[in-house]
Amino acid sequence: MTTLTTAPAKQGLGPRLNALSKIVELGAGRLDDRLLKESGALLMRAGERLKLSSEHTVVALAGGTGSGKSSLFNAVSGLELSPTGVRRPTTSRTHACVWGLDGAGPLLDWLGIPGRHRFARASALDKGESRLHGLILLDLPDHDSIRALTDTEADRLIGVADLVVWVLDPQKYADASTHRRYVTELAGHDAVTVFALNQADRLLPEELAELVIDLNDLLRREGVTQPTVVPTSAVTGRGIDSLKRVVAEAVSRRRAAIQRLEADLDRLTAKLAAASPIGDAPPGVDAARRVGLTDALCDAIGVPALGEAMENAYARRAEQWVGWPYARWAAGFRPDPLKSLDLGALEVPQGQVSAQPAEVAGAVQTMADGLSAGMTGAWRAGLNHAARSRSGRLPQTLGEELAEVAPVLDRVPGWWRALKVWQYLLVVAFALGLGWLLVGLLLPAQLPSWLAFLGDTATLPWVGVATGAVLGLGALSAVASRNFVVLGAGRERERLEREMRRRVTAVAETLVVEPVEKELARHHDFTAAMRGL
Amino acid sequence: MNEAKDDGHPESAGEQTLFMPPIRDVPPPEPVGEAVPALDEETPPAAEEELPPVVAEQLTAALDTLRGAVADLGFGLDLPGAKDARQARADLLAQLDDYVLPRVRTNAAPALIVIAGSTGAGKSTLVNSLAEKNVSRTGVRRPTTGVPVLACHPDDRAWFAGGELLGGLRRIDKPTPEDGLDSLVLVSTEKLPQGVALLDTPDIDSVVEEHHEVAHRMLDAADLWIFVTTAARYADAPAWKLLRLAKERGARLAIVLSRVQPKAREVVLKHFVRMLTEYGLGEADRFVVQEAQVSEGRLPDSEVTDLRLWLAELSVDEERRAQAVHETLRGVLDSFRTRVPDLARHLEDQVSFRAELRKDIEAAYLGALTEIDRATRDGSLVQGEVLARWQDFTASGDLTRALQPRRRGKAAKQGPERVQAFRTALRTGLESVITVAAGRAAEEVVGRWRQRAELGAKLGEGLERPSDEFVRRTSRAIVAWQEHLVELVRTEGVAKRAISKVVTFDADSLSLIFMIAMFGGGNTEGVPHRLVNALLGAESLRAIGAKALSDLRARIGVLFDEESLRYVQALDAAGIPDEAAAARLFQATYNLEVAR
């Protein structure tokens, strides 16, 4: 991964093509269709060309009608293979001449040259021609006549040839149809482009010199940094050897096919980079963002509110058990205004859990926005889409999942029961004490003898003190146990919230984080491939 | 052919067409279409040769109106075809100024013969040879001629120097390197016959694309075209594009095939003529110039004898010249029948594109409003935290505390924190419903725009999310709405008499219960509903509910209006096509046809 991102821009053709195929694979739906198609076509062409003979170099003679492509073709091959003439356009089919036919068949098939237009030069027979061994010379139809408007043969072969020799002539060397459509477009193909200025015999030497300078200037202006211009004349044979030398050099290096593909790849790379600037996004969802998402989802469910409600309910229920009974009885006597409204039962069902759909959507959106901030165009939309892909089920799933841990509101701890017993014992003790006091003070005379001790005036003050103490003890234990209740409620709330968070995190992981991470990984791989291009 | 004359005020006819009397304000589309061919058929060419002054005046007025209408056009939106339309507009305007208007005003002017063709075809050499003077530079460099050169007889010089024809070009005597394509070299020579002038133009097919533009501008101003091509080029696509244009425009055309090798002459000529005939140009005058030694930029005299004779004939035979001039003019005026409506159609495209994009904005935000409406009705607002708070609110006795028996005087102390949290939960819920809906709407607008055209994608850049202040504004709006609801409950929520005797309530808390009842979905049997119903009465409940909801909707509407304004502004910034301009164009074309 890191090797890809830190590697120098220029690599071998192989790794770069791998990167391109990765881009085509990952870029579907994220890149312009036209560009994807172009990339796919280049991949296909590269694959096919590299599989075919590397011993052969395809050199195409291209140019406007009447520039003398066929004459030059014949002059280079030394045979009258391609018809020449004065009617325009003359050549309508591509002709090929092969030096060293072995293994060239499949390549010619791939180029789409029909058998009857193929010619072979067995190089062994021709002395001095051995340097051209491996050359496949194509004589293309023109690209600028009215015939070419409906025939894309020339256009197709200019696109696939390893080396293109542009055949120009003094009349047409500055035609827009050649320069705008091809030369400017193929700027950067210096190594695999040669310009033959044909029909040089028509000019005076000083005129030719002026023209060559002018053509060089023009080509440099168009981005061809080191133009190779060869003045030729098919009529006098001038310059043919120079042209052969240039071609032979390319043929003997056996590199033209690769250079051509590299140049094409360079151009495509520039286009891709312009169309899809390398975005910046994290390779995965980091811990902070996960926590952020869980927090936001918990808010959408109202986990803190549920906790608070649970705490309140816990305290209220505890009051029923461990509270001071006298306070409870007193509260029961307070009038309830709602009763007077005659509304029937006003019980709101408790313990329900659900998620607010809009807040859930907002939580997911916030995370997606944060992650895609550095992304470009379609990738942003793609991440949004991924984040939402499963989140439609999120509110319901969250509701169902958390309903299982909904606060339990009927559990009664043992100490509550014990305290209740204790409190009632105290109440009973108080009642007994009160009875003793009343009887002892008011009716000491009527007491039967076996109960006479109740009226014992010496003990009565002590009984009074004890009764008061019992009352105080009840209040005191109520206060004390309330503190324990608060503690217990806090613990219970903590437990509830922790459990809810855990479940929310798990649900978010499968329904949101997982698809998002997949998309992030795709983006990451894509940018890595772009850097490796 | 002249309806304006019928009103009996010939002197005001020009004005009438200019200001478009109301009766013609919007011409029915059908009559235009039908009137055009009818007028054409009824008008014999001879009738146009002598334009009576009144007719010329009306024609000028109609053309002025057309010019105004075309000049007012603007194609702000970069739709496919906008570039062509802008170019077509500029061409049309230039042709009106350079050629049509001057030609209609002064139809006795000398004929302008424009020599056009491929680079290297020998246009300049031809002009030099005919003028017998090196008026235009020749050479091996392509393209050679940059500044157009006009050669004419000294007597005609004054007219061309006057600057009616091709008025936009600066007249100069000698080209200097600084002179650009906006100048015209004017040379007079006695070797050229009177009444005809030759204009040597830049090429139509070299890498210097400005040249093509200038050449076309020259051709638009030509009375006659001489098209020059060579034996090597006669099948070139650009050449045939130009020939097709000449045919479309109905321009008078002569064709010169130069640089023909003597031994190939027969074959090439035969082939070329066959091609011309196939294209329907077999009638055009043809000249052949053989490949010959060019000395000092000129051809041997023998090669241009035919052409010289042709020019001389044109010069002497005024009738023929006038006919040629009028044919071309008519051709140009005819071409307006398609060129102007084409412009109008593109303008209509722009107008309708803009309308569609605006509709997208409205549709998206309308959808968002509907979504919010649904959320307020289907109970989804009473979920999550709101539900938890509501449960807490009821169970903790806050509900009971909100209502107090009358005789105990003021309401007892509230649990303010809990009520506050409850209120906040409701606000947050409502806020997120609105912001999520707004986010969807923003995304939808941009998505729809992107689908429509590349331009739409460009306009929507940076507008994929709601604006930064949207959340803040929403929260302010909801707070305000909640306060408004409390106020409503306080002022309008007059409790039923039977109740008010017994119970008093706290408006703050009651407004919260009210919201729960309102957003709780269709469940009218629920506790909150029964409660507020009992307290306020069904009628009062409905009234407050309706008011509260419509107030909420209005506040959200304002929020969304502000949001959608961003898109409208982006759209406006790209250019607002004038919706009436298309109608004006059709009107002007109609007027022109009437005046012809």
Image (tube, grey):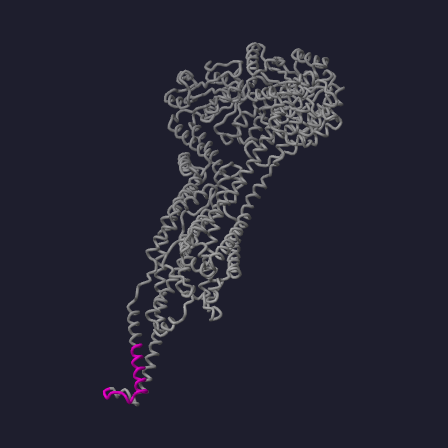
Question: If the image is split into quadrants, where does the C terminus of chain B sit?
Answer: top right
| Percent coordinates x, y for residue B331 in the rendering | 64, 21
- Snapshot quadrant of residue A98: top left
How many marks can you see? 0
In-front residue for pair B26/B77: B26
**Residue A243 visible in image:** no
* Relative image position of residue B10 (x, y in whole percent): 75, 25
- Give the left or right position of residue B582, taking residue B12 as reference: left
**Location of residue B584 (image quadrant):** top right
Up/down of A413 relative to B240, above or below? below
Q: Which residues are magenta?
A: A426-450
Residue A272 is covered by the magenta coloring: no
Q: Is residue B466 left or right of residue A41?
A: right
In this picture, residue B53 sits left or right of residue A371: right
Location of residue B211 by image quarter: top right
Check the picture and name the quadrant holding the N terminus of chain B.
Answer: top right
Residue B218 location, x and y as percent? 65, 24
| Residue A131, above or below A368 | above
- Please state if A240 lies on the left or on the right of B208 as rendered: left
Magenta stretch, main secondary structure, is helix
Between B132 and A209, which is closer to the camera in this rendering?
B132
Q: Is residue B586 above or below residue A26?
A: above
Q: Position of residue B511 (x, y in %)?
A: 48, 60
Q: Does the magenta segment cover residue A432?
A: yes
Of B145 and B297, the residue lying toward us = B145
Seen from the viewer's position, the closer of residues A517 and B264 is: A517
Q: Residue at x 50, y 32 (%)?
A: A188
Reply above or below: A326 against A140: below
